[in-house]
Amino acid sequence: MWVKFVYERNTYVVDLSQVSAFACAENGRLMFCLPHSPVQIIIHPQRNPDSYQEILNYVENLTGLSLDCNQKTK
């Protein structure tokens, strides 16, 4: 699955099947590194809501597990 988004004034089109790991960060942000690159991408749900949801859906469909990035931590 491919996803397109704008990050730091650059437009990216990424094949999610090439991303090896996804992580949730503070404030519900979704993080991953671009394939074959040290570039770390942080997708914020309010800035890129469509791409954010597409990535969450991809992870859930692929693994059967949900990344609950909106869960508040103590």
Image (cartoon, rainbow, N blue to C red):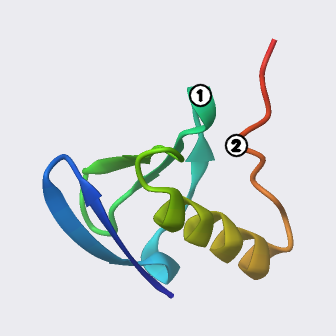
Do we see residue 20 in this rendering?
A: no
Say above or below: 58 vs 40: below
Left or right relative to 51: residue 74: right
Image disc number at residue 69: 2
Task: Report the disc number at residue 27.
Answer: 1
Q: Is residue 27 above or below residue 69?
A: above
Estimate how packed mark 1 is, as few (under 14), some (14 to 19) or many (20 or more) residues with alpha carbons within 10 Å.
few
Secondary element type, mark 2: loop
Task: State the quadrant of the C terminus.
Answer: top right
Using residue 20 as the reference point, say whether residue 41 is left or right of it. left
Q: Assess whether mark 2 and mark 1 are in contact (beta carbons under 8 angstroms).
A: no
The CA distance from mark 1 to mark 2 is 8 Å
- The amino acid at mark 2 is Cys
Q: Residue furthest top?
A: 74
Query: To which quarter of the image does residue 73 belong?
Result: top right
Q: Please state the horizontal and vertical placement of residue 55, each as a whole percent of the image.
A: 57, 67
- Residue at 66%, 64% in the rendered image: 56
- Asked whether residue 15 appears in the rendered view, the answer is yes
| SS type, badge 1 | helix
Residue furthest out toward the bottom = 1
In depth, the one of 17 and 11 nearer the eye is 11
Farthest residue to the right: give it: 64
Classed neighbour count for the residue bearing mark 2: other residues with Cα under 10 Å, few (<14), some (14–19), many (≥20): some
